[in-house]
Amino acid sequence: MEDIRLNDEDSCFMDTEMDHQVVDEDTEPPENLEKNEGTRKTRAHSSRRVSKCWKKFTIIGGKLPDGKYDVRCNYCKKHYFLDLHRNGTTTLLRHMRVCAKTPGSTPRSSRKLDMDVFREMIAMAIIEHNLPYSFVEYKRIRMAFTYANSTIQFWSRNTAASDVLSIYEKEKQKLKKVLSDIPNRVSLTTDLWRAITIEGYLCLTVHYIDSHWKLKTKILSFFAFPPPHTGIAISMRLIELLKEWGLEKKVFCLTVDIASSNDSMQSIMKRQLQKDLVCNGEFFHVRCSAHILNLIVQVGLSVIGEALHKIRESVKFIKGSESREIMFQNCMETVGIQGKESLVLDVATRWNSTHLMLVRALKFKYALGNLADVEPSYTSCPSALEWSRAELIADFLNPFSEMTKLISGSSYPTANLYFIQDWKIENWLRAHELSTDGIISDMVEVMQEKFDKYWEEYSDILAIAAVLDPRMKFAVLEYCYTTLDPITSKNRLQHVRSKMYKLFKAYQKNQRNNVAAATSQTLPEDIPAVTSDDESYVSAGYDVSSSLYQGFYAFFAQKAGGSGKSALDMYLDEPVMDMVAHKDMNVLTYWRDNSSRFKELSCMACDVLSIPITTVASESSFSIGSRILNKYRSSLLPTNVQALVCARNWLKGFPIEDETEEENKEEVEEEQEES
């Protein structure tokens, strides 16, 4: 018997002369293949048309008594008994589309699909990857979904937006629960942003230490805020948000930039929240360090604008054409400079990028000099005096650059890390205020004026944060103040010490109130007599972890310091830890490990170390917003914008460093195009 596969585009089948000749392909003797090949070709061309299904199915045996044929799939080995004269090959073609083992088929998943879970996963992808809501309506996406599971029920962009809002509400409730459970206070930052749609958006972020002693930063709200952007309008809206989140009694400080409306806003908020603030709000207002430093630097850089202008024009000249870059490479080889680094152009409004431009230009200054000798059209090479001024400015901007790295990293730093950087800046200003170069001395004078104006009261909280670092304490403050001015150092130290003890007493008072509230509870009438056997309490059914006993242990711990020294005194009396041996120490880990010893001081450390000294966190939210609300998605509703921005932050965090660097690169390219 002979194995024959029939092919018929019109799904027809003819059984004449073939009933005895059809056998299983696997049973046909190999020696018959060549002999039968010619017969097959002849019959196929003479009496039958081609059907694609017969390339993947085999007829087993001949026609059965009931007129049907036994047809088997060559891949999954499934059998069909079909009357091919009446039904044709429709069943076989359908099987080809869904057979899991057939190449090119669309397999049906054997797993039951939960559409609610699947839709939530797609909504999460929309949030995390900045996908448009219409993503779920893309033709190719739907084809891919159908290929994965043909039972998927598709939904519209409006349903996708609703799914995102559901995730936002769910994550919001989770964050509310976390914030209500933390025992310490929280710090806030806020800032305004104008979107591409010209709408104003106000962002509020929260900074806190969680139950695992990790510093966390979350966006609380990102909402459309139409004019007027006055202090009273902003303050009223922020107080409403604090009440909505249940944080009106847990605020420690608010960090804002130096705009006049923010000064008015924080004053109003301080009056509204005063009874619930530490020390009546004395430490409530924190000015953004980055804005202050940027203002100081911009004022200074304007004085030496000519040297900066020449360096900037030099970079633009070289990067203006490929031939000039090749020429500059030759100049580098001539003066013996090697390496892959090259000149970079700054963004004029970002002093950290200006610092990088200066550092690179100084490295290639001899190559630039050689270029000026060989290329007559290059006329912006700085003079020797201008190069020396650029070196001074680059040296001055070093601490600014270090601080920028601290505040722009993927993990937000604790406040103890900033005091030294600020001291370096002030130290540089003092060292160059009597410079023989008139341009430099004029620059230092205007910068020192700005530094003193904004730093006078703000430096206190940074100094307290430095003292709460066991590697520094007052020893570092004494060194820094003495280096700056030995005459005033003692008074400055005493000032910081008095502020710190005042703050600590507020936490002591709060701790006593908590202890009193715990010990004033009505005692059960059936408390057994006190014995030395602790098991009697357990057997009597009393939970030693209850608030009653916690209050007792807290009270006893205070009494145990019988020397009369407070936790702050004991902490300051201990020797300073070696900075080199503990250079990588996490200061929050130290306070977590010593929280049982220092009690209320550890609570104070939590609140002070979590203070954000810049509004970078709020500004980072604008980076998320600019990805979501761009020229291609400018019609998004404000409620959807808030859901996307907040949910993305809660699920993924703030933009990582690579994303921030990419944004900086784009801004530089845009500025080059404009120029």
Image (tube, grey):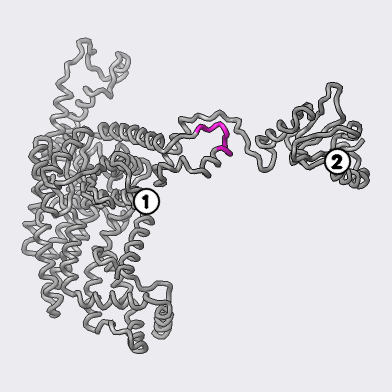
Q: Relative to residue 118, is residue 434 depicted above or below? A: below
Disc 1 residue type? Tyr
Name the residue nearer the viewer: 672 or 281: 672
Magenta span main SS: loop
Q: Relative to residue 215, is residue 150 depicted above or below? A: above
Q: Is residue 428 left or right of residue 40?
A: left
Q: Are marks 1 and 2 in contact (CB under 8 Å)?
A: no
Instruction: Give residue 640's quadrant in the image.
Output: top left
Q: Is residue 112 left or right of residue 45?
A: left
Q: Which mark is residue 632?
A: 1
Instruction: Give residue 533's quadrant in the image.
Output: top left
The residue that mark 2 highlights is 47
Q: Nearer the viewer, mark 1 or mark 2?
A: 2
Disc 2 residue type? Ser
Residue 350 x/y as whole percent: 25, 63
Identify the residue at image location x=17%, y=41%. 252
Local SS, label 2: helix
Residue 208 x/y as whole percent: 25, 41
Marks 1 and 2 sit apart, C-alpha to C-alpha, by 60 Å
Residue 386 x/y as whole percent: 22, 80
Identify the residue at image location x=77%, y=36%. 57
Asked whether residue 56 is drawn in magenta, I would say no
Q: How many marks?
A: 2
Give the crowd class for mark 2: few <14, some 14-19, many >=20 residues within 10 Å. few
Name the residue nearer the viewer: 638 or 237: 638
Residue farthest along the top direction in this orientation = 526
Local SS, label 1: loop
Q: Is residue 86 visible?
A: yes
- Quarter of the image with the C terminus is bottom left
Q: Of marks 1 and 2, which one's residue comes earlier in the chain?
A: 2
> Where does the magenta region start and end?
146-153
